[in-house]
Image: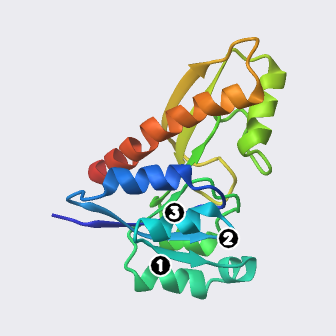
Amino acid sequence: MKKFRLAIFASGSGSNAERICQYFLNHDTIEVVLILSNNEKAAVLEKAKRLNITAVHFNKEEFKAGGRVENVLVDNEISHVVLAGFLWLVPAFLIQRFPNRIVNIHPALLPKYGGKGMYGRHVHEAVQNSGDRETGITIHLVNEKFDEGKHLFQAACAIQPTDTVQDIAVRVQVLEHKHYPVVIEQWLQNG
């Protein structure tokens, strides 16, 4: 039986990373091996330590130039990469090393509200200002452009006219936590 070894990249609190780690705890074929962050103060690094998962901090040069980040992935025999609130564009050499093996979650129904600078609160504010009646999540493969990879899954939730940005964020996060681990599992097991 093939064993999948995951690395999770995150930039912030790590609620999705933590949920994914908990979901795959004691899984027969899927293991979260590493959590990496470009933010040395990110709460996700502390969560990794609490979960007994190796935590790695890196800077922009180490990420863009290869070397250290790529070596950590290779040395830990990572088979797939999960982005969970990671805000940097993945360099082409990593996409080539992990073709169709990097997945991301976006807090909107792409192609709406995607692209550079569209993350977290920025997305929810844009959705609120648009007058749209729904938003949601998109789980997609990663390519060389922000939020343009092949869609694997989308889930929607309604927006009420009285919703605040925080209300929208909470609804979207519920969808993220419910669906992201399950979609990752299906993506890995179904090839």
* Earlier residue among tags 1 and 2: 2
Q: Amino acid at mark 3?
A: Lys
For mark 2, does the 10 Å Cα neighbourhood hold few (<14), some (14 to 19), or many (20 or more) residues? many
Foreground tag (1 vs 2): 2
* Earlier residue among tags 3 and 1: 3
Residue 185 in the image, given as x and y percentages of width and height: 33, 49
Residue 130 in the image, given as x and y percentages of width and height: 81, 22
Cα distance in 3D space between marks 1 and 2: 15 Å
Residue 94 in the image, given as x and y percentages of width and height: 56, 72
* Residue positioned 76% across, 40% down in the render: 121
* Earlier residue among tags 3 and 2: 2
Is 186 left or right of 16, judged from the image as shown?
Answer: left
Label drawn at residue 73: 1
* Residue positioned 57% across, 36% down in the render: 173
Cα distance in 3D space between marks 3 and 2: 15 Å
Q: Residue furthest right?
A: 129
Picture quadrant of residue 132: top right
Q: Are marks 1 and 2 in contact (CB under 8 Å)?
A: no
Residue 180 in the image, given as x and y percentages of width and height: 45, 43
Say which element carries label 1: helix
Q: Is residue 24 above or below residue 183?
A: below
Say which element carries label 2: loop
Is 50 left or right of 69, judged from the image as shown?
Answer: left
Say which element carries label 3: helix
For mark 1, does the 10 Å Cα neighbourhood hold few (<14), some (14 to 19), or many (20 or more) residues? many
Residue position for label 2: 38
Label drawn at residue 61: none
Residue position for label 3: 47
Q: Residue furthest top?
A: 161
Q: Is residue 113 above or below residue 50?
A: above
